Amino acid sequence: MSKDYYNALGVARSASKDDIKKAYRKLAHKYHPDKKEGDEKKFKEINEAYSVLSDDKKRAEYDSYGRVFSEAGGASGAGFSGFEGFDFSEFSKGFQDIDLEDVFGEFFGGGFKKERIRRGRDVSFDVEISFAESVFGIERKVLLNKTASCEVCGGSGGTPGTELMTCPTCNGKGKVHEARRSFFGTFSTVTTCSTCGGTGEVPKERCKTCAGQGVLKREEEITVRIPPGINDGEMIRISGAGEAVARGLAGDLYVKIHAKQHPIFRKEGNNLHMNLSIKLSTALLGGNYTLRTLDGDIQLKIPEGVSHGEVLRVKGKGVPIEKNKRGDLLIKVQIELPSKLSKSARASIEDLRDKEGI
């Protein structure tokens, strides 16, 4: 039975790439294993679904045939995935240390299975910013205590300046042969050398700081660039800024943004919106109003005879879109009516009503 990747991400089959990306970001943050209520199995499922549905070629294959063939090895195109749903537990008793996917890959995958590159864990944390920072963007420097590349050796695992020598484990080949038992017999596979990481060379002298591992637990300062116009709850992904791993790829860093609300302004797309209360006399006669914006004070001209609920536009005072271009500030006028009138004011208004019909 093929997997339902659309259901895994909670999107319709007609979903756009943006919809798929948004659904993935939301679920990845929710089920990340580092979270208190994370779910590693669910996290892997949504990552698998996203890797297929975010790729046009893979998605087309999946929509047409219910599975993806472009990643399979050999001519059969099915690999070990063709045995989904079959229980091999009875056959594998006594061979708990054998990777059956490797074995069946020999027969049905047309060759050895794709080598897995070691990858460090992803890291996630939350950042709170002000409303103005969410509009204009900002850079934040954060200190993370995580496994990172050794600063002394630069991740090489060797003492700075030391020479490289041929790896004694693989004799400079970068790969080693490994014999494995199975119920079909003994099979020889080729794997990346764990000593040199596939390079075929190792430093003559190990780095004393990281004991030759190239990575160690330490504090690392990371600059998070928060773009203009970011919304509350959005996620920023910094590739390679997660946990480092010896002779492998570092994980990613996920930053969830929490933007504070503003007592006056609200953001809708590239525009800022606000309400402005004015007196009845200003609405009738017009006038100038000093308005405090995120850019500082500006003079707003209230036109004569403005209506209640009318929207005034101040161009270029909204969210930055690109260099020298911004959205607008939209001001909704609300006219304050006096709760009480003096005798003279009442007489004047009654006179206007009789003469002007207002």
Image (cartoon, rainbow, N blue to C red):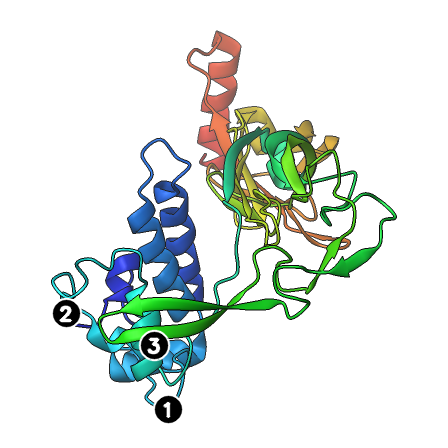
Q: In which quarter of the image is residue 265?
A: top right
Q: Which amino acid does label 3 sit on?
A: Gly
Quadrant, the N terminus: bottom left
- From this view, report whether residue 226 is shown above or below residue 18: above
Q: Is residue 27 something that shows in the picture?
A: yes
To which residue does mark 1 refer? Answer: 75
Q: Which amino acid does label 2 sit on?
A: Phe
Q: In the image, is 97 to the left or to the right of 209?
A: left
For the residues marked 3 and 1, what is the alpha-carbon distance in whole angstroms? 12 Å
Q: How crowded is mark 1: few (under 14 residues within 10 Å), some or many (20 or more)?
A: few
Residue 61 location, x and y as percent?
34, 82
Residue labelled with disc 2: 86
Residue at 75% x, 35% y is 208
Q: What element carries label 2?
A: loop
x and y percent of residue 72 in the render?
Answer: 38, 80
Name the residue that disc number 3 marks: 105
Residue type, numbered disc 1: Ala
Which sits earlier in the primary sequence, circle 2 or circle 1? 1
